[in-house]
Image (spheres, coloured by chain):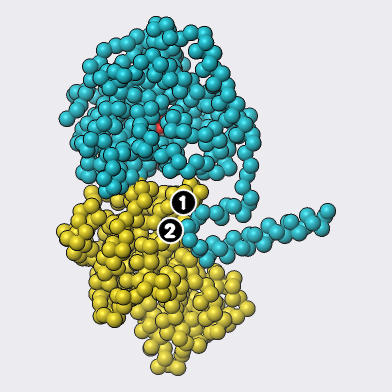
Amino acid sequence: MTTMHTLTPQTDLATDVDDVARLVNEDGERVADPELERWVADVDVTALQGLYRDMTLVRRIDTEGIALQRQGQLGLWAPCQGQEGVQVGTARAFRADDFAFPSYREIGVQHVRGAKPADFVIAWRGEEHSTYNPYDINTATPQIIIGAQSLHAVGYAMGIQRDGTDQVAAAYFGDGASSQGDVNEAMIFASSFRAPVVFVCTNNQWAISEPVTVQAKFPIAGRAPGFGIPSMRIDGNDVLASLAAMRWALDHARSGKGPAFIEAVTYRMGPHTTSDDPTRYRDKEEVERWKRRDPIARVEALLRSQNAFGDDFQADVAADADRLGAAVRAAALGAVSRQPIGVFDHVYEEPHTGLAEQREHFAAYLSGFEADAEVGR
Amino acid sequence: MTQLTMAKAINEGLRRAMVDDDKVLVMGEDIGKLGGVFRITDGLLDEFGAQRVVDTPLAEAGIMGTAVGLAFRGYRPVVEIQFDGFVYPAFDQIVCQVAKLHYRTRGNVKMPITIRIPWAGGVGAAEHHSESPEAYFVHTSGLRVVAVSNPQDAYVMLRQAIASDDPVVFFEPKRLYHSKGEVDLGADLADAPPMGLARIAREGSDVTLLTYGSQVAVAMDAATAAEDEGISIEVIDLRSISPVDYRTVTASVRKTGRVVVTHEAAREAGVGAELIASVTEKCFNYLEAAPVRITGHDIPYPPAKLEKHHLPDLDRILDGVDRVLDRPNSMSGVIEP
Ligand SMILES: Cc1ncc(C[n+]2csc(CCOP(=O)(O)OP(=O)(O)O)c2C)c(N)n1
């Protein structure tokens, strides 16, 4: 079994954020990890610059989202600041025809998969539950029911098996989600059927106000072997380690060896959502400690040490981010609500007489207003 | 035409659906070698193999959630829930995912999942084996809900449910599994009445008796007994309880002016409540009497030795008929608030 970190059962290890595999340390220095580094041997300076650009764009989408929410343009926003490394790193490992099942916080995954500016804001604005067609970017509509998508990924992977192709499905979920029955059932199904699926548990230390210790006493990655699934515990703020681990996991699943599990240890820098007040449950020092581990600053330092972070590059990325930020803003401000009668669309694929009748009644009711407006004119 | 039990008719329906479309697969607990605890999937494993007849881990949310993923991938899973009372662990996946994914994705992702549930009481079963949870699903937009009452419908409607691009909750009365009836195995789905249409099981002119699934046979017996007393009951087998075929229902009520609804499920906020509310809205001026519900009591399903007092039987239905006809009945002299 390809277990890269031997985990011995001891209590309180769940909180040990340094018991992780990494390739780039907090100061942006490359560190050796023979298991991981072979998966990113091809990642040169240009590729590293690409990862930096991705993460910077994702952070920009995030800050724009928060601003739009504060300005009353979005109903809610679930920030991902601090988690860009794991999101971008793992998503960049996918093949285009692999299929991702993300949660609401995986902005970076959506970005890498090809989501358009409107796709980040239209749902949070309350216009639609989803803008994109999942099949266009092989990414499911983000899931709000905690953990539910893990089973969908396994079912999708069972479909891949039956189709005899070598795609992989992946499920993203949080440390809180690891307590859900769905996630545990997903691991049992995946393991029993050797489904080509990868589980990415983003352990950002908190499930709203509940620390990870409420969900786990032992590292979450340590659960997977109990299901017969090899796992890795990595530094989720290290984009290179995230890419390497995901390449390992995808390769494992793609080559018919069954599911794989990654626990990415990271930190949610902002509030859970814009409705949350993290000052009530966590202290400043903790947040300060994690600031030192910023995934973007880390790659910047690495690039600088390789003389690959010049003014031109920096300005180019900043301009790119500005353009994307403006496009996200424009998509939110330019959103047009569907016609009221549109709420009845797509409830059923085939006509449903009960709903058809309600729709007719509501249409007649609405047209009464139009008639009034005619008269008033 | 062939004489088949309902169990065998459903088995044939599954087999035909799997022959017709290789995207159809069945999944559930014990459905492979054992053929399911009711043997409904008997022989399918041998014929179609383990890729299409999937013995799953013992986890209902897992079964339902992976069915969602398979549907995402273009498959048409037919899920067997072992017994009615065991659908609850899968409830979240059914109401939040199966029912809503088509809506959430603006029609891009289809959920052609059929959820078969051996259903309701009357077989002397243990606790949690005789539940009637249909109202939960009828209340959930995005699902279709049907209940079959005879082998022919079981065969045809199952195939229609599997062919439907919408998710269908398919209730199979286990007390009718071994009852026989004529089944036209060569029936062309295109010619068969759609799943959403009600069936007038017996024509009558004095009272409309609305029911579905397990209670249809009881209602038919009640109608026969009433005839001896000179009362003509029209029995409507709804077949589909979401949507309800109100065209057939209201035509009958406008003719008879009197309505009794019977089902095994508890009364409070049950399907009967919905039927009577709708019939009252649609036919108020035709009603000669307040509609009456004859249902299970609002109690947890009782122990097997007492279930006969819970399940609406012929006498309780006839008592309800007496009430809508203002004949002497159990409520005579009782002043209601
Ligand atoms: C089934 C369910 N229960 C509760 C919630 C409310 N809720 C939303 S996010 C959340 C915390 C999730 O934490 P985690 O899984 O660690 O993911 P994170 O938000 O930290 O990325 C909760 C309790 C929900 N959406 N779904």
Please tell me in which quadrant of the rendered image residue B173 appears.
Answer: bottom left
Question: x%, y% of residue A246?
Answer: 31, 28
Q: Amino acid at mark 2?
A: Asp
Residue drawn where x is 38% and y is 48% of the image: B72
Q: Which residue is mark 2?
A: B166
Mark 2 beta carbon near ligand 1 (under 8 Å): no
Question: x%, y% of residue A49?
Answer: 43, 16
- Contact between marks 1 and 2 (CB within 8 A): the answer is yes
- Kindly indicate which chain is depicted in yellow in the rendered structure: B
Q: Earlier in the sequence, mark 1 or mark 2?
A: 1
Question: x%, y% of residue A93?
Answer: 35, 28
Question: x%, y% of residue A170?
Answer: 34, 36
Residue drawn where x is 60% and y is 34% of the image: A331
Residue A106 in view: no
- Kindly indicate which chain is depicted in cyan in the rendered structure: A
Q: Secondary structure at mark 2?
A: loop
Answer with left or right where residue A316 lies relative to residue A86.
right
Q: Quadrant of ligand 1?
A: top left
Figure check: B221 above or below B161: below
Q: Which residue is mark 1?
A: B102
